[in-house]
Image: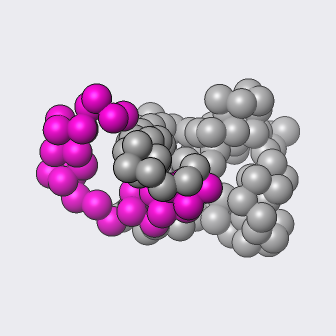
Amino acid sequence: MPLQESGEMYLESIYVLQKRKGNVRSIDISEYMGYSKPSVSRAVGLLKDGGYITVQKDGVLNLTEEGLEIAEKIYERHTIITNLLMALGVDKETAAVDACRVEHVISEKTFDAIKKNFKDFI
């Protein structure tokens, strides 16, 4: 099942929250992303059905191997693009917002070129 941008954003959010606090539940995602509980519940169901996450009986969400791979990729893109934009003089908030938009559409080839040619900035 191909993952859409919103699914990537949810996986990245789960990843970030796991790094920050360990166990992550739907309510944590709702608060972090600013989405309604029903919206998060629907997304969690889709991600679970797609094999990207598992949900424990106590509601704790875990990334599957595939989900973790995607989340790490998106997080790396976000971090590197944010840092590159900041190195170019963009303020941190704007850089993070713009990186969030770019990280989902940039090709692998272009991102690899950025990593290779701008490693001193990132």
Residue at 39%, 57% (x, y): give it.
Answer: 103
Residue at 39%, 62% (x, y): give it.
Answer: 102
Residue 23 in the image, given as x and y percentages of width and height: 76, 32
Q: How many marks?
A: 0
Residue 117 in the image, given as x and y percentages of width and height: 17, 38
The residue stretch that appears in magenta: 93-122
Depth order, front residue of 40/48: 40
Q: Quadrant of residue 112?
A: top left
Depth order, front residue of 5/65: 5
Residue at 76%, 68% (x, y): give it.
Answer: 35
Residue 111 on the magenta segment: yes
Q: Quadrant of the N terminus?
A: bottom left
Residue 38 is left or right of residue 48, and the answer is right
Residue 12 in the image, given as x and y percentages of width and height: 55, 48
Q: Is residue 43 visible?
A: yes
Q: Quadrant of the C terminus?
A: top left
Residue 64 on the magenta segment: no
Depth order, front residue of 48/89: 89
Residue at 77%, 30% (x, y): give it.
Answer: 21
Residue 74 in the image, given as x and y percentages of width and height: 43, 48
Above-or-below relation of 42 to 74: below
Magenta residues, dominant SS class: helix
Above-or-below relation of 78 to 106: above
